[in-house]
Image (tube, coloured by chain):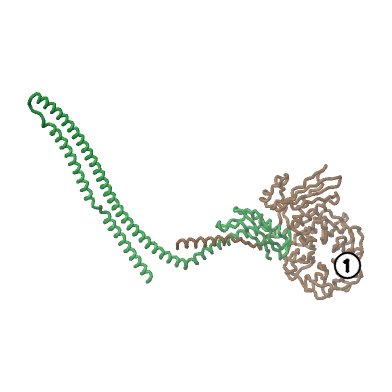
């Protein structure tokens, strides 16, 4: 009996152990990787009489690559993707997360229909299909739009690829004279269109928040003036022409006000100009140079550069007044602030190791990360979705457009730009 | 110490008892192996054998005597007389013959009877013998039985004693085990826990390495999913239990698990769980 009891005891004991192990395993995942998403975009198939007008897949791939959030595959794995049934297992082995299969169709001379299907490789599922009509003139922008749609679908973030950029370029004519122009181009620097050319320097372009107009400084008449120019019509309006410096204009998010640097009182200070009432309000009152004001997205405060501490540093201040709060402390040179659309990050130029480099600050904890190597990088500007920063880099004595992802993972030079490129700004909207 | 000594003494006592028992068995065995008194039965058989021989002899003697009885007739008288005599003799002879025949027949019958009797006797004797034998066998069997029973009883006693001793031992061991068991099970549990931890860690690492966190996830986003896996570790199904996150986050979670498939297997099969609950909760 006792032996039996003993056996029973052991059986119960073992079963208890077994039952213990059968309670569902729980695993907590708290860490992940912050990397680029692998995606395959084989060449879009073309159905039409002549050759495909564009390498659509290439444009999308470069867009996604530039964002730093994707690593588009160089190979297209035609065997696995071109046939009717997609070899998802193969693509999984190649560790590709997404597949875009597209087609461009010439529906009539100069008119096209672009369509694509986005697949989730690991779930072996179609995520979305999309088609849009376009024409020869808008075709490239349409492709950027496709990039935006894919980007949004996968990352949940609005794409910025179809948002335009503006910059100032200076070209030397044959006679040796410099010609300045205000250019508006696609986000990859393609198709630049000059909206203004001038023998006199052009400076500090800034977009209106609706993306329809630009404000800038023109030295027309050998005097600094601030203009607002509507892109669609080319009509321009003089907003400020005070004595001395008229610089660094930026329209408020609601478009009713303008912050700018004026020196008519002798010392460059920041002012607020009400565009409706034309009333001018002095915001900073210091003996130092206060300039390069930018709006915080809420329209209540501004960031600006001031040398009140001895060297240029970035400060924040309410437009209604009050004390300026210093935001940058590292290094002897921090200037040219630009705020991400969500107001969480600030990009600026910092001098580090005797080089001027683009940095980004997390405004929630003031952590700074340097994104570019320098040596003469300037005028950083956030993309409308805050994932990328465009800036002017120097190549020899010439300025070129550079783009860097806000995490610094991806950096590219948009070498297509012609001439000496300065002060690029990304439009606030697409 | 005292206890140990006692145990030693006890062992000695037990061994001595055991020896005594064994000796006892041997002695008992010998005494019982002594054959029962067979002599008596042999004598009876002999007696009977003798009697049968005597009977046969008697029978033979009778046979020889019978012709002697037929011979006392004839002498030389007158012819008539002779004839008469001869006739008479003949008649007498005939009668005698008849008588003889009758006698012979009677004798035969007697012999038969005797034979039968003898047979009967023999059979009776046989039966008797049988009975005796049976009795002897029975006795033997009984003796054997008794011996067996005794042996059995002894065995039983021994077994009982052994049992009791075993039980005592078991009781003791149980007592000791009861004292030792918690430590042993604790050690086992610790080992299992360690293996389970290793299993969990390997899965965690495999999934974490493949979880491409969404770029703009909110810090309080989390997702709880139930993953069904095959014995090979291949992910069969992902069921979302509850999520406080957008579609992008959920997809990243699903993809991480699918990319991690097949999930690593435990070192101990018993730790394998066909269902795993994952909580994805990014920490800054």
Residue receiving disc 1? A256
Element under disc 1: loop
- The brown-coloured chain is labelled A
B220 on left or right of A274: left
Residue A88 seen by the camera: yes
x and y, in percent, of residue A141 in the image: 83, 53
Q: Chain of mark 1?
A: A
Q: Residue at x 38, y 69 (%)?
A: B4
x and y, in percent, of residue A303 in the image: 80, 69
x and y, in percent, of residue A416 in the image: 80, 54
Q: Quadrant of residue A211?
A: bottom right
Q: Quadrant of residue A395?
A: bottom right
Residue closest to the eye, A298 or B178: B178
In the depicted structure, whether residue A304 falls above or below residue A396? below
A219 on left or right of A38: right
A364 on left or right of B185: right
In the depicted structure, whether residue B73 falls above or below residue A274? above
Question: Where's the C terminus of chain B, which quadrant?
Answer: bottom right
Q: Colour of chain B?
A: green
């Amino acid at each position: 009996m006792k032996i039996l009891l003993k056996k029973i005891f052991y059986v119960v004991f073992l079963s208890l152990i077994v039952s213990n192990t059968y309670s569902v395993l729980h695993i907590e995942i708290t860490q992940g990787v912050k990397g680029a998403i692998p995606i395959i975009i084989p060449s879009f198939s073309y159905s039409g009489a002549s050759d495909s007008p564009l390498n659509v897949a290439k444009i999308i791939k470069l867009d996604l690559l530039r964002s730093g959030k994707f690593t588009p595959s160089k190979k297209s794995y035609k065997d696995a993707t071109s046939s009717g049934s997609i070899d998802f297992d193969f693509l999984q082995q190649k560790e590709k997360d997404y597949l875009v299969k597209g087609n461009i169709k010439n529906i009539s001379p100069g008119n096209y229909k672009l369509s694509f299907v986005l697949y989730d490789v690991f779930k072996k599922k179609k995520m979305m299909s999309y088609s849009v009509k376009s024409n020869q003139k808008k075709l490239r922008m349409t492709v950027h739009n496709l990039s935006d749609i894919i980007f949004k679908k996968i990352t949940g973030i609005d794409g910025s690829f179809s948002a335009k950029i503006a910059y100032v370029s200076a070209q030397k004519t044959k006679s040796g004279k410099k010609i300045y122009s205000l250019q508006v181009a696609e986000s990859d620097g393609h198709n630049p269109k000059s909206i203004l050319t001038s023998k006199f320097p052009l400076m500090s372009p800034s977009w209106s928040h609706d993306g329809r107009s630009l404000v800038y400084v023109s030295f027309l008449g050998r005097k600094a003036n601030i203009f607002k120019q509507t892109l669609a019509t080319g009509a321009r309006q003089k907003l400020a022409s005070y004595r001395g410096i008229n610089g660094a204009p930026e329209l408020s998010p609601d478009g009713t006000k303008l912050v700018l640097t004026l020196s008519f009182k002798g010392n460059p200070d920041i002012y607020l100009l009400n565009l409706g009432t034309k009333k001018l309000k002095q915001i900073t009152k210091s003996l130092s140079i206060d300039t390069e004001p930018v709006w915080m997205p809420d329209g209540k405060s501004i960031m600006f550069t001031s040398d009140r501490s001895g060297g240029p540093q970035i400060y924040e201040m309410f437009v209604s007044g009050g004390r300026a709060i210093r935001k940058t402390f590292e290094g002897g040179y921090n200037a040219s602030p630009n705020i991400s659309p969500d107001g969480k990050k600030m990009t600026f130029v910092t001098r580090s190791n005797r080089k001027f480099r683009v940095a980004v600050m997390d405004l929630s904890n003031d952590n700074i990360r340097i994104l570019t190597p320098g040596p003469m990088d300037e005028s950083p500007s956030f993309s409308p979705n805050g994932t990328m920063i465009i800036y002017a880099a120097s190549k020899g004595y010439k300025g070129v457009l550079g783009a860097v992802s806000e995490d610094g993972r991806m950096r590219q030079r948009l070498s297509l730009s012609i001439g000496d490129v300065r002060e690029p700004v990304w439009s606030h909207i697409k | 110490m005292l206890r140990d000594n006692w145990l030693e003494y006890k062992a000695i006592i037990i061994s001595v008892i055991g020896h005594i028992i064994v000796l006892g068995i041997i002695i008992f065995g010998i005494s019982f192996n002594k054959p029962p008194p067979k002599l008596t039965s042999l004598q009876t058989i002999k007696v009977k054998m003798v009697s049968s021989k005597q009977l046969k002899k008697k029978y033979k003697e009778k046979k020889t005597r019978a012709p002697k009885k037929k011979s006392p007739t004839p002498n030389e008288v007158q012819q008539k007389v002779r004839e008469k005599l001869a006739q008479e003799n003949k008649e007498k002879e005939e009668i005698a013959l008849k008588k003889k025949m009758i006698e012979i027949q009677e004798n035969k019958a007697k012999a038969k009877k005797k034979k039968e009797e003898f047979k009967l006797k023999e059979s009776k004797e046989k039966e008797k013998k049988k009975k005796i034998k049976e009795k002897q066998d029975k006795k033997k069997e009984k003796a054997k039985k008794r011996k067996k029973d005794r042996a059995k009883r002894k065995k039983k006693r021994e077994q009982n004693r052994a049992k009791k001793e075993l039980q005592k031992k078991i009781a003791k061991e149980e007592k000791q085990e009861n004292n030792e068991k918690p430590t042993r099970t604790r050690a086992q549990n610790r080992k299992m826990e360690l293996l389970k931890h290793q299993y969990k860690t390997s899965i965690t690492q495999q999934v974490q390495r493949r979880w491409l966190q969404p770029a703009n996830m909110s810090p309080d986003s989390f997702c709880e999913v139930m993953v069904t896996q095959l014995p090979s570790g291949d992910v069969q199904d992902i069921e979302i239990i509850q999520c406080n996150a957008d579609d992008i986050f959920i997809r990243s979670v699903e993809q991480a698990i699918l990319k991690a498939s097949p999930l690593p297997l435990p070192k101990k099969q018993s730790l394998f769980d066909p269902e795993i609950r994952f909580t994805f909760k990014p920490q800054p």
